[in-house]
Image (cartoon, rainbow, N blue to C red):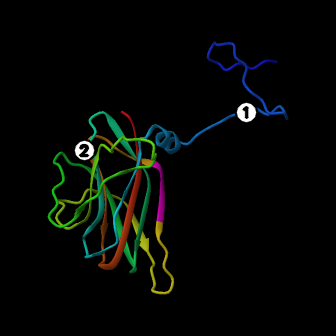
Amino acid sequence: MIITDGKGSGSKVAVSKENDLSVVTMSAISKATQRGDAFSWNTVSYDIITADTLLTVRNTSAKRLLVIHRLYMYTDVIGTYDVHIQTVSTAFTTTHGAVVTGVNLNTSSAKVADAGAISDEEAIAAQGTVILTLASNELATDQFAIDFPTNDAIVLGTNGRIAIDATAAAAVCECTVIGYFIDA
């Protein structure tokens, strides 16, 4: 029996020397990185107060969706952190925080992220819909970061935003959002 590629080209599918079907797959984040469409938004370490937004990222592309692949955060205190999403039509303005530039995960790509981001913001208006609460069990002698893979389940359309808010003050905070763009 001959198995073809199923595209009508008449090409045969490849098999290994043990006659196993040869399949090469890549994750969506790997494909996006190769295209130059994957980015990381990362805060520098800073001191947060209760209700601060550690990091917020907003998709500004009118044609592409921003898929959130991974969330990472670290603080030096026990606390919970609300992850929320919403659609906001107005651009970010900073009153306290710092602008965060998305870093392309493909160093050979000159593409820039179609997104705005701010860290350590105190004046973001209403919180969006909380989709997840992360809990940190930090102790001075036993510190662990929260590294949360989203399994690409969070997708931001035009003006969609994701943010992580603190429910407790901390002297040290770091936060990263990793995501990639796909055509809508």
52 up-or-down from 63: above or below: below
Horizontal arrangement in the rendering, residue 184 relative to residue 126 (left or right): right
N-terminal label among 2 and 1 = 1
Vertical side of 25 occupied by 2: above or below: above
Q: Which residue is mark 2?
A: 159
On screen, residue 17 versus residue 26, left or right, reads right
The reply to whether the magenta stretch includes residue 149 is yes
| Badge 1 density bin: few <14, some 14–19, many ≥20, Cα 10 Å | few
Q: Which residue is mark 1?
A: 22
| Amino acid marked by disc 1 | Ser
Residue 144 point in image, percent of width and height: 49, 75
Of the 4 image quadrants, the one containing the N terminus is top right
Q: Which residue is situated farthest in the bottom direction here?
A: 141
* Segment tinted magenta in the rendering: 147-152
Percent x, y of residue 28: 51, 41
Residue at the spot x=30%, y=77% of the render?
168
Q: CA distance from mark 2 to mark 1?
A: 41 Å
Q: Quadrant of residue 112?
A: top left
Residue at x 39% of width, y 79% of height: 76
Place of residue 29 in the rendered image (x, y in percent of width and height, measured from the top left):
49, 45
Indicate whether residue 148 is drawn in magenta.
Answer: yes
Residue 64 on image: x %, y %? 34, 36
Dot 2: within a 10 Å radius of its alpha carbon, few (fewer than 14), some, or many (20 or more) residues?
many
- Which kind of residue does numbered mark 2 sit on? Asn
Q: Main secondary structure of the magenta part?
A: strand
**Quadrant in which the C terminus is drawn:** top left
- Residue at image location 31% in from the left, 58% down from the top: 84
